[in-house]
Image (cartoon, grey):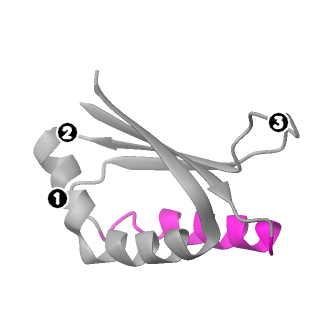
């Protein structure tokens, strides 16, 4: 199993609305991206300086599934939206 975790820092303008829209778009990939086994999205509620605004955890059977997800048209649409509202992102991929 592969776990893919992404942390997103959003731009300050329309942050709350963009967080909700990002969550909606990310969750909508379930059933569209065949290799995506599960996905969980959380919107941060803490105001600590080192906090990120949004986190997602996705799971795949193997590295090939993660690669298929990375290039899937539904995922690329989400990435386009995230790029338009994010200051930066961080990622961790690991096998478990």
Is-magenta flag for residue 24?
yes
Percent x, y of residue 23: 61, 63
What number is the disc on residue 61? 2
- Using the image, determine if residue 90 lies above or below residue 80: above
Percent x, y of residue 67: 17, 53
**In the displayed image of the protein, which residue is found farthest to the front?**
87
In the rendered structure, the answer to whether residue 20 lies left or right of residue 48 reads left
The residue at which mark 1 appears reads as 68
What number is the disc on residue 79? none
Asked if residue 13 can be seen in this view, the reply is yes
Q: Earlier in the sequence, mark 3 or mark 2?
A: 3
Foreground: disc 3 or disc 2: 3
In the rendered structure, the answer to whether residue 59 lies left or right of residue 42 reads left
Q: Residue at x 88, y 40 (%)?
A: 47
Q: Residue at x 85, y 38 (%)?
A: 46
Which of 91 and 66 lies nearest the eye of the viewer?
91
Look at the numbered disc 1 and give the secondary structure of its residue.
Answer: helix
- Give the quarter of the image for residue 49: top right
User: What stretch of residues is rendered in magenta?
Assistant: 13-32
- Give the quarter of the image for residue 70: bottom left
> Would you say the residues marked 1 and 3 are in contact, meaning their CB atoms lie under 8 Å apart?
no
Look at the numbered disc 2 and give the secondary structure of its residue.
Answer: loop
């Amino acid at each position: 199993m592969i776990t893919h975790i992404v942390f997103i820092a959003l731009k300050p303008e329309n942050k709350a609305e963009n967080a909700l829209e990002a969550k909606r778009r990310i969750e909508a990939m379930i059933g569209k991206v065949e290799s995506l086994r599960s996905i969980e999205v959380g919107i941060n509620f803490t105001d600590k300086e080192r906090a990120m605004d949004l986190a997602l955890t996705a799971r795949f059977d193997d590295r090939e599934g993660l690669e298929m997800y990375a290039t899937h048209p539904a995922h690329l649409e989400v990435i386009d939206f995230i790029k338009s509202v994010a200051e930066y992102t961080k990622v961790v991929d690991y096998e478990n």
